[in-house]
Each structure stands twice: as structure tokens, then as C-alpha cells.
């Protein structure tokens, strides 16, 4: 079941990346990110309130009262995710989605190293084959004609930093899932994200760089960002919470969102050099299939 949830999360995450790209075109990164956190708060705050008032009692949507230590852990989670988002949003605004998605897909490399070193996880032969194929494929995509060597290094570094903090968040999620329910993690860290983001926006000149500002233009796609992210994360957290789930495998499958992002970039955004990247995207699918074989 955790494998199915991981693949569903990847599909929803690809849609989320597409709506981010559309929303950020000629738009304010800070404004879009702030609206994202505000809408996420509107989605999840009612779940907390209904749980506290007794309208939700038990079940997957029930949020229990957390200890002060658990709240602190979720505040740390919010900071890590916001760092990943800020770097990722700025990078995505300035780079094609068919470049950003493959770079982001290198995140499982960091997760894999962390999972093996710190969580004691081990991968079988099929899973290692899948990991190697996916890693080689995403680096090949990044080396195409409009790849990372032909664009501003600044934005590439931003996307790489986003992937790094995203990998740290993934490892941290596995730790959180040992003691906190998925819906509690998702609800409360969204609350803290919104609070932190409001503080940052109120002090923009101090905390936020000038190239992440600009005028904010409302687009319906902005509303779709937290909606698809919320669904993708719920599937992701639910997968991690299940017994036998490997964080390295779940994270790698989740990075399969590169396939969905690629299709959006090719057919809706009309980005360049699609055929040169198509072979590597097919190899990514093959790599994910090997991960599936090794995880049955």
C-alpha cells in the first residue's frame, strides 16, 4: 500500500510543480509563497479546530493535542521546508521546469545516503539498479543544450539548495513519523509555516532578497499550489507511516514527479529540447520500475 501512495504522491507533486511554474511567471516569488502558506493554513486549520471542538473524533483526520516538544519539532520542520521552498521558487521562476524538475530529482541521492548512514536502511539489488538508473538519467537531462551548463549558475545553485533542504526534510519526516501522526504533522507545520512567512514578509528588506520580490498578480493557479501539495504530502506522509516503508524508496518514487513535470513542460509550456530529454525520462520510468520490483 505504501508503494501505491508513493506513486500517487509523485503524480500529484508533478501537477504541483506545473502550477508553481505557471504562477511564478512574471510574478512575485514572495507573494506567491505567502499566498501558498495562507491557503494551506485555510485548508488545515479547520481540521485542528474541529478536532479540538470534538466534531472530529478519531480517524485519519483527527489531530490530537501535541506536547510542547512535538510542537517544537514541527516548528523546525516548517523552517526546513520554507528554506527549500524559497530557494526552489526563485530557481523555478528563472529556469525551465524541464531543467528544475530533473535537478530536484537528485534529492533521493542525499536521502539515500542519509537513510543508509543514519536510519540503518538497506537496499536490495533491484533497488540499487533503480537508484543508479534514475541518478544517471537526471544528470543527463541536466546536460542537454539548455541544461545547467548553459544557464545562470546562480539559479542552478538555488535549485540545488532547495533539493538539499528537501532531502533533509525527507529524512526528518521519517523521524517525525515515529511519534507523530501524518495529519498532525501536515496540519501544524502548515500553521507554523504561515506564521514564519508572515514575519518574513513583514520584514522583507531584512530577510528576503530583492530578486524574490516584485509585483504580485493573482492567478487561479496559485490556489492550485497548496491544494495539490496538500494531497501529495498526505499520500507521502501516509506512506512513510506504514510499517516496512523505506524512506529512500519512497523519496525516489516521489521524485518520479519529474515525469509529470516533463510532460507539462513539453506539451503545455512548449519548452525546448524535449526530444533530447525524452530518452532520459523513459530511463527514469525504468528505474522506478526496478524500485517497484525490489520493494514488492
Image (cartoon, grey):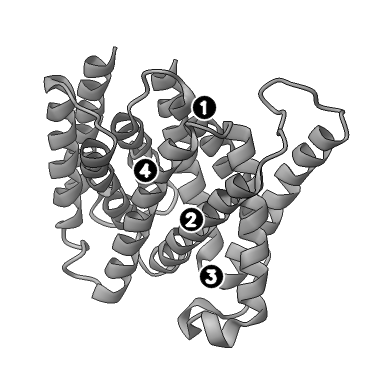
Residue 123 lies in quadrant: top left
* Rendered position, 144 above or below 171: below
Mark 3 Cα-neighbour bin, 10 Å: few <14, some 14–19, many ≥20: many
Q: Which residue is mark 1?
A: 238
Q: What x and y, as percent, mark residue 217?
A: 65, 70
* Rendered position, 170 above or below 183: below
Q: Which comes sooner in the sequence, label 3 or label 2?
A: 3
Between the residue at mark 4 and the residue at mark 3, the CA separation in whole angstroms equals 26 Å
Q: Which residue is mark 2?
A: 81
In the foreground, 60 or 73: 73
Q: Quadrant of the C terminus?
A: top left
Q: Which residue is mark 3?
A: 29
Q: Closer to us: mark 1 or mark 4?
A: 4
Q: What x and y, as percent, mark residue 47?
A: 76, 37
Q: Which residue is mark 4?
A: 171
User: With 211 as the anchor, is 139 left or right in this view?
Assistant: left
Amino acid at each position: 500500500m505504501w508503494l501505491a501512495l508513493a506513486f500517487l504522491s509523485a503524480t500529484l507533486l508533478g501537477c504541483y510543480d506545473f502550477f508553481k511554474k505557471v504562477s511564478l511567471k512574471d510574478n512575485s516569488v514572495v507573494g506567491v509563497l505567502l499566498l501558498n502558506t495562507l491557503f494551506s493554513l485555510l485548508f488545515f486549520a479547520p481540521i485542528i479546530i474541529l478536532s479540538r471542538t470534538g466534531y472530529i473524533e478519531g480517524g485519519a483526520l483527527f489531530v490530537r493535542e501535541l506536547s510542547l516538544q512535538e510542537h517544537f519539532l514541527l516548528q523546525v520542520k516548517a523552517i526546513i521546508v520554507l528554506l527549500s521552498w524559497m530557494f526552489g521558487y526563485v530557481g523555478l521562476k528563472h529556469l525551465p521546469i524541464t531543467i528544475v524538475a530533473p535537478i530536484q530529482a537528485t534529492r533521493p541521492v542525499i536521502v539515500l545516503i542519509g537513510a543508509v548512514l543514519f536510519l540503518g536502511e538497506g537496499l536490495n539489488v533491484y533497488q540499487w539498479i533503480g537508484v543508479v538508473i534514475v541518478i544517471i538519467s537526471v544528470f543527463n537531462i541536466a546536460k542537454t543544450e539548455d541544461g545547467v551548463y548553459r544557464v545562470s549558475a546562480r539559479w542552478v545553485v538555488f535549485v540545488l539548495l532547495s533539493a538539499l533542504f528537501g532531502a533533509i526534510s525527507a529524512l526528518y519526516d521519517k523521524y517525525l513519523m515515529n511519534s507523530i501522526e501524518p495529519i498532525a504533522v501536515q496540519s501544524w507545520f502548515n500553521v507554523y509555516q504561515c506564521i514564519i512567512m508572515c514575519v518574513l514578509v513583514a520584514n522583507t528588506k531584512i530577510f528576503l532578497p530583492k530578486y524574490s520580490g516584485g509585483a504580485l498578480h493573482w492567478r487561479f493557479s496559485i490556489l492550485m499550489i497548496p491544494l495539490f501539495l496538500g494531497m501529495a504530502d498526505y499520500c507521502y506522509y501516509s506512506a512513510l507511516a506504514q510499517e516496512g516503508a523505506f524512506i529512500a524508496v519512497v523519496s525516489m518514487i516521489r521524485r518520479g514527479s519529474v515525469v509529470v513535470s516533463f510532460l507539462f513542460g513539453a506539451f503545455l509550456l512548449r519548452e525546448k529540447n524535449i526530444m533530447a530529454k525524452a530518452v532520459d525520462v523513459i530511463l527514469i520510468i525504468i528505474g522506478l520500475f526496478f524500485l517497484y520490483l525490489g520493494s514488492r
